[in-house]
Image: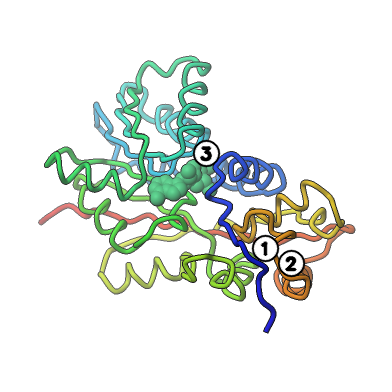
Amino acid sequence: MPVMISPLRSLLTDDSRYQKGYQLFLDRSTEIQRMQDFINNQLPDIMSSTINGKSNLNVIGVGSGSGELDLKMFSALHLKNPKMRVDTEVVEPSPQQLSEYADLVSQTPDLDYISFNWNEMTAEEFEAHWKQKKMTKKADFIHMLQMMYYVKDPGATINFFHSILNKNGKLFISLLTGDSGWAKLDKAYGKRFRESGMASVFMDDVKRHLDATGLSYQSYLLPSKIDITECFTDGNEDGELMLEFLTEVLNFSQVCAPELKADVMELLRHGCSEQSDGKVLLNSNYEMVVIDQLPQI
Ligand SMILES: C[S@@+](CC[C@H](N)C(=O)[O-])C[C@H]1O[C@@H](n2cnc3c(N)ncnc32)[C@H](O)[C@@H]1O
């Protein structure tokens, strides 16, 4: 069986390389456009029963990154309810991302209706901190966009954040679908790529957890693609970075045994992607689930 050439390090151990990879992924993917459409066309309606008549909205953004999507969501909700104030806890472990988020806030006009509380920590640390301080505050809107892959126990994290929703509050989670091309790659090789040997989590796992715990939710499919053509040009720097981002392995081409890399490239080209106009487009369909906190009867 093909093996990795050690040492194998997760891309996440090099935050600045991870963030570069994430930016490249955003440039090559239709994800942000899909999310933008969702925010403009669906979010305000989904949130209407939560925000109607509210003078203050308590928000928690978990793994918000550099905050672009957070600000777009606030703006869409503000249009619907211009008098409502927003109080948001930003939970993000990367200092670089938090500082970019703070810069974006300082450069964006007309955000006086929002107050930001910065928490440089993981979702798990935030939970511990919340419990230790015996916080009684509840949230109306919690979002966890494309971050559940990095959480140690997704079921426990969902249960905790659901437990601090206000009545009529909503918890939004987005993740790749289990049958997306990217998930196929991960299901085939992810355990070998990860030092922990753990499988990653995808939306089918989250839905199984929600069904098992009886939490009520709606789901929205967000079809998306990533242009990975450059991965197939030897020595192309962006292609190499994209491979690191897709596999989560730092310096993937250097640490991966050649036969294993050949298998990965074959799966990427023929098992997970479509070819169009000379481009290789990886299926990165993802899904948003919106979990309700139904009013108590
Ligand atoms: C793929 S980015 C998504 C950023 C943003 N939510 C978006 O959709 O544009 C994942 C983010 O999760 C953060 N993250 C990683 N591990 C985390 C954890 N255990 N708890 C909270 N956030 C985490 C990363 O630092 C990164 O900013």
**Residue at 28% over, 32% down:** 57
Crowding near pointer 1: few (<14 within 10 Å), some, many (20+)?
many
Badge 2 amino acid? Ser
Query: Looking at the picture, how far across and down is residue 220, in whole percent?
Result: 48, 58
Q: Are marks 3 and 1 in contact (CB under 8 Å)?
A: no
Q: Nearer the viewer, residue 94 or 76?
A: 94
* Residue identified by numbered label 3: 40
* Depicted 225 relative to depicted 116: above or below: below
Helix, strand, or loop for circle 2?
A: strand
Q: Earlier in the sequence, mark 3 or mark 1?
A: 3
Q: Nearer the viewer, residue 26 or 238?
A: 238
**Residue at 61% over, 49% down:** 31
Crowding near pointer 2: few (<14 within 10 Å), some, many (20+)?
many
Of badges 3 and 2, the one in the foreground is 2
* Residue identified by numbered label 1: 283
* Residue identified by numbered label 2: 273
Q: Are marks 1 and 2 in contact (CB under 8 Å)?
A: yes
**Residue at 31% over, 36% down:** 59
